[in-house]
């Protein structure tokens, strides 16, 4: 993704940033700034380009940092309207965010004010992490206050900036060891009305679940007690990784913890030899062997062959259903073997299993060929 996005920081965007900064500070040397940014820029990837621009900003903005921060804030465009359909334009402020993280650590209040304004136009999720590391108590206090902010982007920063495993960012090792302070913030956001914030809260819990599955499952079980629809959506999305792994605690929190009494029959795989670029179709009959109704979560796991010949399972969602005693359900699905940027396919023998409430039932094997 970064490879495709890096060209957002080109000569045109550099000159646009220069123009904005000069409008806020007439003494800003646009031409020298552009020359400094563009020297060797083409050889850098996305984050490298943003970091280069941030470094050159430091060379040309007034100092100390509080003076530079006031120029940055004054140069910003209008706040984001809504939570979607704003495209890639907000990425123009990534250098500004990196500048705050690199140059503002000795000026807490000015840096917080700048991040507060930046996050309403892009996101300060990358820069806020440096302050959580340097000033954990003060930053957490500020985030607790921002959790009640009327601006949806500020509220989202509270959950997104504290994700222990935020993509493209250094991990927050302290919160990986002890997610308690993060969970305290998420408690303040669990009933936020905006799906934009709800998704961020869920992603944060999903991060936590990779280091502390029991804590994440127990939290979600508590949250489901009397939960409104938005919170139920958070829980379902938050536990997705654990559910794919068949984690009993997560399945139990969602109501699928009981070991299923089922039989699998009439399994069909077609074709038995799949060419890379094609697809596998499968079907089977699921029959309840229990004396009472069963609430079942049915997924399938495909054990894809890796480059080194080993296999790794990937879980695909199928259905949720309730089967009465002796009840039957015919279930079908398909698996694509199209080449994707996120998954390459390799020839070899693959396996497919049906996962019922996290319990695996073999469905069969098939070959993948070039």
Image (cartoon, grey):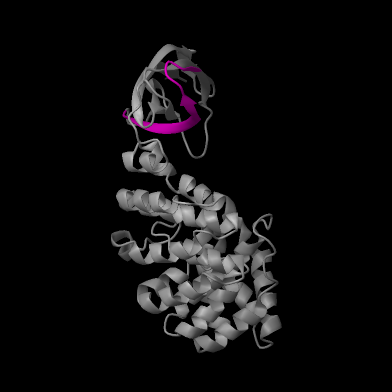
SS assignment for the magenta stretch, majority: strand
Which residue does the image show at 43% across and 80% down from the upper left? 105
User: Can you name the residue that lies furthest to the top here?
Assistant: 266
Residue 312 is a magenta residue = yes
The tally of labels here is: 0
**Residue 45 picture location, percent across and down:** 51, 57
Residue 211 in view here: yes
User: Can you name the residue that lies furthest to the left here?
Assistant: 177
Which residue does the image show at 70% across and 64% down from the upper left? 81
Above-or-below relation of 262 to 29: above
Q: Is residue 220 left or right of residue 62?
A: left
**Residue 31 picture location, percent across and down:** 66, 77
Q: Is residue 147 or residue 241 the one in the foreground?
A: 147
Residue 39 in view here: no
The span shown in magenta is: 310-329
Which residue does the image show at 55% across and 78% down from the upper left? 114
**Residue 167 picture location, percent across and down:** 45, 55
Q: Is residue 140 or residue 313 the one in the foreground?
A: 140
Q: Is residue 355 or residue 341 the one in the foreground?
A: 355
**Residue 236 picture location, percent across and down:** 47, 45
Residue 19 appears in which quarter of the rendering?
bottom right
Which residue does the image show at 52% across and 31% down from the upper left? 339
Q: Is residue 369 or residue 218 the one in the foreground?
A: 218
Residue 228 is a magenta residue = no
Above-or-below relation of 124 to 314: below
Q: Is residue 247 left or right of residue 83?
A: left
Residue 260 appears in which quarter of the rendering?
top left
Above-or-below relation of 236 to 141: above
């Amino acid at each position: 993704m970064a490879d495709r996005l890096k060209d957002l920081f080109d000569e045109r965007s550099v000159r646009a940033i220069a123009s904005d900064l000069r409008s806020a500070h007439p003494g800003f040397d646009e031409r020298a700034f552009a020359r400094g940014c563009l020297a060797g820029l083409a050889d850098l990837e996305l984050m490298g380009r943003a970091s280069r621009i941030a470094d050159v900003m430091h060379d040309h903005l007034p100092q100390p940092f509080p003076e530079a921060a006031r120029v940055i804030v004054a140069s910003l465009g209008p706040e984001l309207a809504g939570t979607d359909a704003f495209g890639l334009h907000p990425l123009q402020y990534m250098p500004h965010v990196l500048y705050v993280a690199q140059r503002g650590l000795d000026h807490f209040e000015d840096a917080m004010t700048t991040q507060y304004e930046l996050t309403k136009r892009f996101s300060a999720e990358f820069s806020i992490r440096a302050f959580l590391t340097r000033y954990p108590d003060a930053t957490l206090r500020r985030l607790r206050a921002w959790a009640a902010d009327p601006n949806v982007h500020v509220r989202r920063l509270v959950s997104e900036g504290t994700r222990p495993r935020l993509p493209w960012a250094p991990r927050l090792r302290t919160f990986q060891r002890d997610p308690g302070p993060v969970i305290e913030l998420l408690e303040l956001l669990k009933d936020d009305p905006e799906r934009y914030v709800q998704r961020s809260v869920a992603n944060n819990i999903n991060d936590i679940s990779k280091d502390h599955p029991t804590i994440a499952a127990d939290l979600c079980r508590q949250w489901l007690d009397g939960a409104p629809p938005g919170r139920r959506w958070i829980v379902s999305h938050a536990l997705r990784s654990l559910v794919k792994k068949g984690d009993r605690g997560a399945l139990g929190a969602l109501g699928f913890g009981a070991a299923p009494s089922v039989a699998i029959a009439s399994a069909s795989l077609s074709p038995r030899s799949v060419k890379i670029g094609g697809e596998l179709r499968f079907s089977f009959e699921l029959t309840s062997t229990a004396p009472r109704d069963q609430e079942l979560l049915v997924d399938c796991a495909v054990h894809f062959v890796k480059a080194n010949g080993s296999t790794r399972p990937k879980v695909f969602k199928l259905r949720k259903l309730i089967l009465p005693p002796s009840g039957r359900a015919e279930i079908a699905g398909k698996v694509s073997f199209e080449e994707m940027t996120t998954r390459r396919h390799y020839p070899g023998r693959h396996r497919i299993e049906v996962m019922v409430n996290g319990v695996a039932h073999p469905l069969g094997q098939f070959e993948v060929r070039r």
